[in-house]
Image (tube, rainbow, N blue to C red):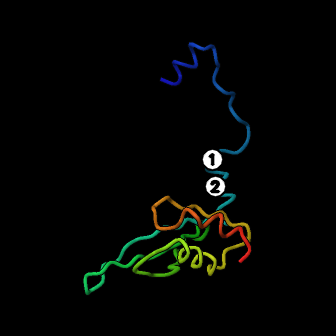
């Protein structure tokens, strides 16, 4: 549908790029890419705990940053600050509603 609209408007496709593709870019930047998310664990007494994890894309190492029954933005930010990430690391975080939205901005601020 988009192609049809552009074609009717007389807009040609973008020229092919000669630079590296997306997969090459990701491989070259893997040392600095981290992804984080929560998963839940059901405890023996029936309560649900939230586990904050980070995966380092270069090594595929998964780190558990912390476990809490009530994740908040402040708690999440503190756990991320406790992580000894490489300076300038890129932090990818899905918008899951447990405070990860604020992590990138707060990590840039002085502690």
Secondary structure category for the residue under label 1: helix
**Residue under label 1:** 22
Q: Residue at x 37, y 79 (%)?
A: 49
Q: Quadrant where the C terminus lies?
A: bottom right
Q: Residue at x 52, y 74 (%)?
A: 62
Residue 79 x/y as whole percent: 57, 79
26 displayed left or right of 44: right
- Contact, CB < 8 Å: mark 1 with mark 2? yes
36 displayed left or right of 50: right
Near-viewer residue (50 or 19): 50
Near-viewer residue (98 or 31): 98
Residue 51 x/y as whole percent: 44, 77
**Residue under label 2:** 26
Near-viewer residue (35 or 48): 48
Q: Residue at x 71, y 35 (%)?
A: 17
13 displayed left or right of 42: right
Q: Residue at x 52, y 25 (%)?
A: 2
Near-viewer residue (72 or 7): 72
Secondary structure category for the residue under label 2: helix
10 Å crowding of disc 2: few (<14), some (14-19), many (20+): some
Q: Marks 1 and 2, how far apart in space?
A: 6 Å
Q: Work out which residue is located at the far bottom of the displayed protein and give it.
A: 45
Q: Is residue 14 above or below residue 97?
A: above
Residue 86 in which image quadrant = bottom right
Can you tell which mark lies on residue 41?
A: none
């Amino acid at each position: 549908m988009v192609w049809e609209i552009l074609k009717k408007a007389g807009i040609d496709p973008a020229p092919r790029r000669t630079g590296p593709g997306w997969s090459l870019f990701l491989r070259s930047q893997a040392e600095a890419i981290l992804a984080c998310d929560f998963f839940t664990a059901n405890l023996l007494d029936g309560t649900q705990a939230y586990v904050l994890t980070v995966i380092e894309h270069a090594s595929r190492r998964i780190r558990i940053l912390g476990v809490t029954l009530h994740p908040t933005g402040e708690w999440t930010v503190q756990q991320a600050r406790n992580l000894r990430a490489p300076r300038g690391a890129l932090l990818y975080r899905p918008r899951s509603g447990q405070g990860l939205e604020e992590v990138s901005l707060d990590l840039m601020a002085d502690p």
